[in-house]
Amino acid sequence: MFRSLQHPGVLAITLAAAGILMVTMGIRQSFGLFISPMDTSTGLGVATISFALAVGQFTWGAIQPVAGAVADRYGPRPVLMAALIILAIGCAVTPFVQSGFGLALTFGLLASMGSGAGSFSVLIGAAAQRLPLESRGGASGVINAGGSFGQFIFAPINQKLIQSIGWMNSLWAMAIISLAAIPLVNKLTGKQTAPHPHVEGDQGLRHAVTTALKNPSYWLLHAGFFTCGFHIAFLVTHLPGEVNLCGLPASVASWSLAIIGLFNIVGSIYAGACVGKYRSKYILAAMYGSRAVLVAIYLMLPRTDWTFYAFAAGLGFTWLATVPPTAAIVGKLFGTRYLGTLFGLTLLSHQVGGFLGAWLGGLAITQYGDFTWMWYADMVLAAAAALVNLPIREAPVVRAAAQPA
């Protein structure tokens, strides 16, 4: 896989995209750590703060096809520049709000719009249009690993900042880091294009979207990704609350999130390599099925810090590693010309699930005092996601080698 990244300029483009995703995803995936200190400081309540984060989950997904379409039309550079600036503004103004509505606007809309516009759909689309065919699978794995590395380093950093200088100052630090990532945009969005690009018939964005929405495999892919969003949003938002219910220190939550990110670095790179060897639908089915098994095992184990760390390691291997095979299927079905838009729509379904995972988790803890029913729902949805990927009509890997992936 790494040999495929040795073409001139390929590694630099890949690492620039991975660096941007490291910042946007690292900051976003740490938002759950702010629930408790924000509740203590403002008295808004866990349910209200969870709703703002749930709005953020949906917003992050809703902006993906919009940002992807703008990037497909005008290029990714203005989209990514705006994304980092908006993310910085969202983080910077959140400490000044004192209402649930204000929090939904800053944390839920601004910060999430910025993070989403600087995320997978635009970054993978921008890289795919500048990389040779044989490099795309490996590059998508490395880019995805950048987001996981961001979670690995930002979760403990934010926890330390919250404990030492408070949650407000921590958010202001995240705003500065967002702006510091702007120079990476120039490296990613240079004039280099893919060597010997595959000529794809371009009948316009509307035709591409209409064709995709008529494809049953595209909808099955959406259904599986919906469950992925539910699972990830529930855990990233409410894992700190679950840890607290078990009487364990907050550091267990931050390190669990970091371990998820660490193991997903390996999982993402491995998934990127597997895309070139196996049908992506089978990779996705295996990933989703493993999550149902892991949750079942977790529920049977005693709640200790090492249980959380082991659970995080197992989940981390597939956490966001679903992105490379999902993007690969979209690319195989419809090409790369409008990959930003079409993959962005898939990410929207991911975040509809994310909205429900974050919001229903807040309702569960408020109504029942624990997350038991959410864990059961998570298992059922993960098993269903494994099954719905199997009927996807994906071309064999050998045949797909002649097409953009």
Image: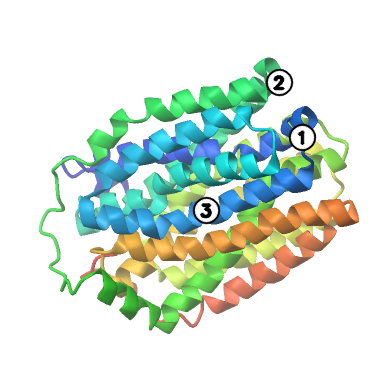
Q: Is 370 on the left or on the right of 95, as rendered?
A: right
Report the disc number at residue 59.
Answer: 3
Q: What residue sits 51% from the left and 75% below the top?
A: 389
Q: Secondary structure at mark 2?
A: helix
Where 335 falls versus 194 (above or below)? below
Q: Is 183 on the left or on the right of 385, as rendered?
A: left
Report the disc number at residue 163.
Answer: 2
Quadrant housing residue 154: top right
**Residue 292 image offset from top left, x and y in percent:** 69, 64
| Sequence-wise first label, 1 or 3 | 1
Mark 1, residue position:
39
Residue 310 in view here: no
Q: Is 275 on the left or on the right of 290, as rendered?
A: left
Nearer to me, 110 or 299: 110
Structural distance between the alpha carbons of marks 2 and 3: 29 Å
| Sequence-wise first label, 2 or 1 | 1
Q: Secondary structure at mark 1?
A: helix
Nearer to me, 377 or 211: 211
Q: What residue sits 60% from the left and 63% below the top?
A: 353
Marker count (numbered): 3
